[in-house]
């Protein structure tokens, strides 16, 4: 079973790092992104990557004097859902149960009793709603 295709292009590792910074801050300038990037490239390289993210539809900007301030075009939870659907389709053949089984089997990441209870409640709710 194939889920809906993301309407935004996938991100490179560096693009994801930039998006993480912008989401965490709410908005950011090129300088702010550069200051927070691990092993940062040049200012020009970050500016080029941010332009690519704008072209892909992930970021938009507003001008504040001579400076552009960038913000995400979509809420983080909506993007996360789309990215997760892509992972489920790509690595688990569209099977949510296989994806959940993999999450439950991650080495070194045991779920707490509360997390297991929460997952059980979500599954029960989905059953009631016929999903």
Image (tube, rainbow, N blue to C red):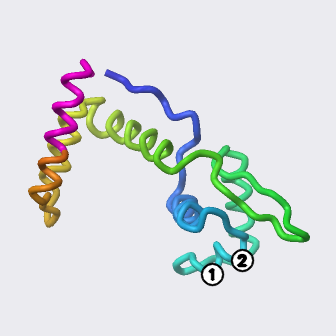
Name the residue at 13% across, 50% down.
Answer: 116
Name the residue at 61% across, 62% down.
Answer: 26
Q: Give the range drawn in magenta.
A: 119-131
- Residue pushed farthest left? 113
Q: What number is the disc on residue 20?
A: none
Name the residue at 63% across, 81% down.
Answer: 35
Q: Is residue 64 left or right of residue 37?
A: right
Image location of residue 112, percent across then percent down: 12, 60
Q: Is residue 122 magenta?
A: yes
Residues at badges 2 and 1 in contact (C-beta under 8 Å)?
yes
Number of residues whose C-alpha sits closer than 10 Å to that of mark 1, classed few (under 14), some (14–19) or many (20 or more):
few
Quarter of the figure that contains the N terminus: top left
Which element is circle 2 on?
helix
> What main secondary structure does the magenta stretch of the protein show?
helix
Q: Does 25 appear above or below 1? A: below
Q: In this view, does 128 lie to the left or right of 19?
A: left
Quarter holding residue 119: top left
Which residue in the protein does label 2 denote?
31
Front residue of 125/68: it is 125
Which element is circle 1 on?
helix
Which residue in the protein does label 1 denote?
35
């Amino acid at each position: 079973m194939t889920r809906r295709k993301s309407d935004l292009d996938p991100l490179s590792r560096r693009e994801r790092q930039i998006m993480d910074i912008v989401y965490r801050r709410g908005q950011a300038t090129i300088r702010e992104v550069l200051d927070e990037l691990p092993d940062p490239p040049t200012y020009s390289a970050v500016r080029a990557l941010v332009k690519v993210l704008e072209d892909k539809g992930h970021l938009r900007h507003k001008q504040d004097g001579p400076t552009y301030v960038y913000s995400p075009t979509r809420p983080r939870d909506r993007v996360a859902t789309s990215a997760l659907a892509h992972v489920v389709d790509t690595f688990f053949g569209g099977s949510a149960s296989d994806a959940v089984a993999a999450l439950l089997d991650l080495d070194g990441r045991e779920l707490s009793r509360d997390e297991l209870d929460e997952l059980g409640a979500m599954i029960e709710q989905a059953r009631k709603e016929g999903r």
